[in-house]
Image (cartoon, rainbow, N blue to C red):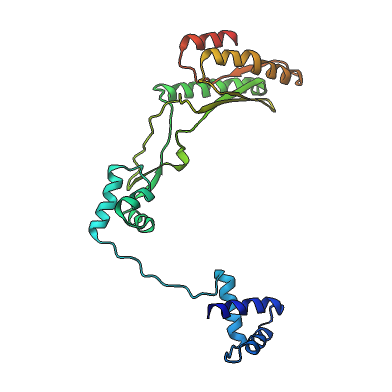
Amino acid sequence: MMYTLQEIIFIYGAENRCARRTARVFNERHPDKNTSHQYVIDLVRKFEKTGSVCNKINKKPKILDEASQIEVLGNFAMDPITSISKVARLTNISAGSTHQMLKQNKFFPYKVRILQQLEDDFDRRIQFCELMSQRIQDDPNMTKNICFSDESTFFLNGSTSNCRYWDNENPHVFREDHTQFPQKINVWAGILGDDIIGPAFIEENLTGELYLNLLENEIDPLIIQSLENQVNEEGNMVLDPQISNMTELLHIMHYL
């Protein structure tokens, strides 16, 4: 039966999508069949809507007992950042049923955030915003002479995009992490006016010495080249270096 249904679709295409000719050709090939043009139309509509000529199989949802739900929810209570597929393997319950139980019990996959541990960071940011707002009012072109820069570390210890914390309330969880991993690369880039400075790459652990060397030999020449193409040859640099050693950081600031 399946082959004949597929055959109707092929004939329909060969007969320039004419249902009456399709029914006539099909009945000529299969005299024992009595296919009407309306049947062809209905079959084509189903094929265009579902991509298949098969009838939809209505599966009744699997009834999960209370013990199964307790087992699944218990796994997530013990380890909220575990995955649905892992719990499904441990409990021998399908991933779809596991996900369904989480939804029924109002568990939501909250995204884990990574933040820098800076105790007075908020106050310092407010002060910086107030200071910059006043300076921009005094000189609207000031920001055009500032090189805004930042660094990013790409490493192989996981991605927050794929990490979720399952709970029925937002726990506001932050993942404690470190920046020094063997398999990683540091990328620096800056924006000066309308120019993009860099990017520059550091494959080793980012230290004050390496950062100072990067400033002297790579970043500085790029900034000078950018300033030479601008009318106003004043330039300041805003850094956010990932340097923990204060002595090395002071050397960098002295260089600037």
Residue at coordinates 75% horizontally, 18% vertically from top-left?
228
Horizontal arrangement in the rendering, residue 173 relative to residue 184 (left or right): left
Q: Is residue 16 above or below residue 69?
A: below
Residue closest to the eye, 190 or 19: 19
Residue 56 in percent (x, y) is at 47, 73
Residue closest to the eye, 125 or 112: 112
Horizontal arrangement in the rendering, residue 213 relative to residue 14 (left or right): left
Residue 37 in percent (x, y) is at 62, 86
Residue 72 in percent (x, y) is at 29, 52
Where, quadrant-wise, is the C terminus in this rendering? top right
Residue 115 in percent (x, y) is at 43, 30
Q: Is residue 214 above or below residue 111?
A: above
Q: Is residue 71 above or below residue 216?
A: below
Residue at coordinates 56% horizontally, 7% vertically from top-left?
254
Residue at coordinates 39% horizontally, 70% vertically from top-left?
59
Q: Quadrant of residue 140?
A: top right
